[in-house]
Every structure is written in C-alpha cells, then in structure tokens.
Image (cartoon, rainbow, N blue to C red):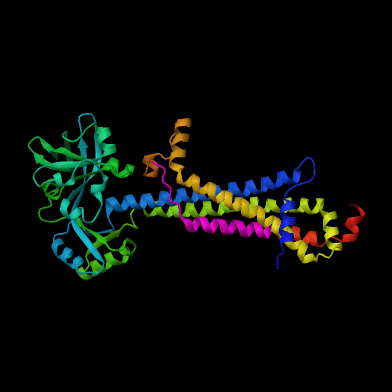
C-alpha cells in the first residue's frame, strides 16, 4: 500500500537541490512535451471530426438519404414507387425529381450547371434545403412561373440577385429551317442558397418540377424518387428494400455512395493522423525515462540512505513510479485542457492566422467547404488522455527498477 512518505519523496525529487536546477528544468520540459503532444492530437482529431461531420451534414442537406432512378433516366410509374416506399418501415418521406444538365447564361458569364426540378412541398420533407436559403424561398417556385433558385457562388459568378433573369440552355437541340438550335428558356431568380459546399453553390440550380418537365420534355415521367429514412445509417439497406418491393428495374443510390472516395479519404487521413501524432505523444512520454534516469543518478546516495533505514526495493520503485506518473498526469491534464480550448476556438484561430498570412487554408473548390469546422468528441479526449497516461506510466518502469537495484554500500562509498 502506498504511504504518504513515498508521495512526499516523489514530489521532492521533482525539484533539484542543485543551484542550476537542471533536473527541475528537464521535469518541466517533460511535462511540456506531453502537454503539447496531447493538445495537438486533440485539436487535430477535433478538426478531422468536424470536417467529416460538416461534409456529411451538407451532403445530406442537399442530396437526401437515398434516391431511386430509372435505368434510362426516366421513371414513368413513380407514383406507384412512392406508394411502395411509404409502405416500407422506416421511410419518413419521398419526393419526385427531374435531373438534367444545362448551361445558365447571365449578363456577364455563362456556366454549366445541374438542373434539379422539384416539387417544393414534397422536396422540403426529404432534405433541409430551406435552411440553406439566404434570400427568397423555395415555395416561390410554381409550375409555369419559371422561377429558379441558384447557389451563392453561382450568383456571384453571374452577378445576379433575386429578381434578375437568367437563360437556361438545354444541350438537346430543336430542328429549325436555320439549323439545330439548343432549347432555351428565360427564368427569373427567386432565391439564393448557400450550402457551404462549393460543388453545390457553384453548379446546382433548382426549378419547379413542372417547368423542368417541359424544359427536358419528360412528359409525366420523372428522373427518380428521393427518399428520407428515420435512420440515415440504414439508408443503404432500406433503399434496396424499397426497390425490391417495387419489383426492380431501377437504379438505387444512397448518401454513402455519393462522394464515397472523399469520405473514405477523410476517415483514412484521420486514422493516419491519429497514429502519427500518437507517436509524438509516445516520444514525449519516453522523455520521462531520461528524466528519471538522471534523477536516479543524482539521488543514488539518498536512495542508499533510504535503503539502510529500512526501505524495501519495492518502496524505491514506488517512489520513482510516482514521480514519473505525476509528470505524466500533469502533462496530460494541461494538454487536455489546452487541446479542448484550441479545439473550441479553432475556427477563430484559423481565421486570424489566414488573415495574418494572407492565405486560405481550405480552398472551397478543392475541399468542398470554405470554413474550418471542429467537432470535439469527449470519447477521443478520454482515449488520448488514457493512452498518454499509460505511456507515461510505462516509461517509469525501467528507471524505477534501476533505482531499486542500486547497491546501498556502493552508492554510499561515493556519496
């Protein structure tokens, strides 16, 4: 059982009686090394967690949980599919949509976009598009009104705002006496959304499903059906269940397949960063070995006196294990507090650093998002602290054993 005297000796050994105070300095360096390593690991994992969460959340806000489309791009009996989906347990909502490619022309520029025709009432039950709006409303889209909702980045490129007009050009041509000309239609901007993902803000527009049907000549058919489930994680299985009950002959997709390589790369990067930074924590923890070895060397005379006074080798082992553990605990607690503080304010700190350096860490056209999100997971903090303490404790074993193995008579001869 640990005695208070052993803790008192361990605390005393953290300070040096030498005038230069070298041992006290290297003890502080060991604490600082563990603290910095733990703080960096917490901050980096929080940034990776936030990045993954934000990308997934914004994808779901635009794409929904799953979709079923016709094999040839047309789904004629979509009403029957919708009734089938409503009978599948776990299906919360569904909405038809028409999808097509077009060019959108403004006063100053022209860009290629993906056009999505939606029924606002049904679409907003499957995705959170209304939360992304910065101007206007999706309910302003009416059949025959030829209104259009565009992304913020696209609005900036075309220099348009709600109330301005755009021209949509469909690549499918119309034969005329003058030759084949593309189909085109003038639309009025009724809203602007900001998904926070450059891919959508720059290349996606919404129109009413009736206007899209006329523009792409779909008749009463649609491109597919968008689905929302009670549990997003069950979407890959649930959407297949809906398709099978419908009778097949359709193409299914879900949110885990959209940008699948990007999401997997985030998870792989997160795992690699955890291992690499964990090695940094290990290096900082193993600094305790050198610290305790030097303490054992300086205190060998005092260790011999303790032994001659009746202290058992196990008592000496506990003294040095306590000393190293105290260093590890202090470094871990300071590092955890610092890491949590940095993670909570990482977006602000990154913004200040970007302005100071005149650069942008997250290019929106590469990383999909432009801000610097963080998501602190307390399970990660606990795991990091636990590993750091375990490494610190393991680092005390060899120096403690060396201290206990010193021959008292030999040590006192040179004391």
Say which quarter of the image contains residue 307.
Answer: bottom right
Name the main secondary structure of what is drawn in magenta: helix
Q: Write the residue at 16% across / 34% down.
A: 163
Residue 278 position in % (x across, y down): 58, 53
Q: Where is residue 152 in the image (x, y as percent from the top left)?
A: 27, 38
Figure quadrant of the N terminus = bottom right
347 vs 316, nearest the viewer: 316
Residue 340 in sight in this render: yes
The residue positioned 47% from the left and 50% from the top of the image is 46
Estimate the x, y position of residue 284 in percent, counting from the top left. 64, 50
The residue lying toward the viewer, choosing from 253 and 271, is 271
Q: Start and end of the magenta stretch?
A: 371-396
Queried whether the magenta region covers residue 372, the answer comes back as yes
Q: Is residue 190 left or right of residue 66?
A: left
What residue appears at the point 79 percent right and 59 percent down from the top-left corner? 403
- Note whether 281 is above or below 346 in the view shown: below
């Amino acid at each position: 059982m640990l005695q208070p005297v052993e803790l008192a000796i361990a605390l005393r050994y953290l300070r040096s009686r030498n005038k230069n105070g070298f041992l006290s300095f290297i003890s502080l360096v060991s604490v600082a090394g563990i603290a910095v390593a733990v703080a960096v690991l917490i901050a980096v994992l929080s940034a990776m967690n936030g990045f993954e969460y934000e990308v997934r959340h914004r994808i779901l806000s635009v794409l929904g949980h799953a979709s079923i489309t016709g094999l040839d791009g047309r789904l004629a009996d979509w009403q029957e599919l919708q009734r089938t989906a409503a009978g599948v347990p776990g299906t919360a909502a569904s909405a038809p949509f028409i999808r097509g490619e077009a060019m959108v022309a403004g006063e100053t520029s022209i860009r290629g976009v993906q056009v999505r025709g939606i029924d606002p009432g049904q679409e907003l039950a499957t995705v959170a598009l209304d939360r992304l709006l910065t101007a206007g409303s999706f309910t302003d889209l009416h059949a025959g009104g030829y209104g259009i909702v565009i992304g913020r980045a696209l609005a900036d490129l075309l220099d348009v705002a709600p109330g301005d007009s755009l021209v949509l050009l469909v690549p499918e041509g119309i034969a005329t006496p003058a030759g084949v000309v593309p189909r085109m239609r003038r639309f009025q901007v009724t809203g602007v959304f900001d998904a926070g993902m450059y891919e959508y803000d720059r290349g996606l527009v919404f129109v009413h499903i009736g206007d899209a049907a006329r523009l792409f000549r779909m008749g009463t058919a649609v491109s597919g059906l968008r689905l929302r489930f009670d549990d997003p994680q069950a979407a890959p299985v649930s959407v297949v269940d809906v398709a099978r009950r419908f009778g097949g002959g359709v193409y299914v997709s879900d949110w885990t397949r959209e940008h699948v390589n990007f999401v997997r790369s985030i998870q792989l990067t997160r795992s690699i960063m955890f291992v690499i930074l964990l090695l940094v924590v290990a290096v900082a923890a193993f600094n305790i070995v050198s610290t305790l070895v030097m303490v054992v060397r300086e205190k060998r005379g005092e260790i011999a006196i303790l032994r001659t006074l009746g202290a058992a080798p196990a008592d000496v082992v506990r003294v040095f294990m306590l000393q190293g553990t105290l260093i590890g605990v202090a470094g871990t607690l300071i590092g955890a507090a610092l890491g949590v503080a940095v993670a909570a304010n990482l977006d602000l700190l990154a913004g200040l650093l970007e302005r100071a350096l005149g650069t942008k860490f997250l290019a929106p056209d590469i990383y999909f998002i432009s801000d610097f999100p963080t998501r602190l997971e307390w399970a990660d903090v606990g795991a990091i602290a636990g590993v750091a303490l375990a490494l610190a404790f393991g680092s005390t074993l060899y120096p403690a054993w060396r201290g206990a193995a010193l021959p008292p008579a030999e040590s006192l001869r040179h004391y």
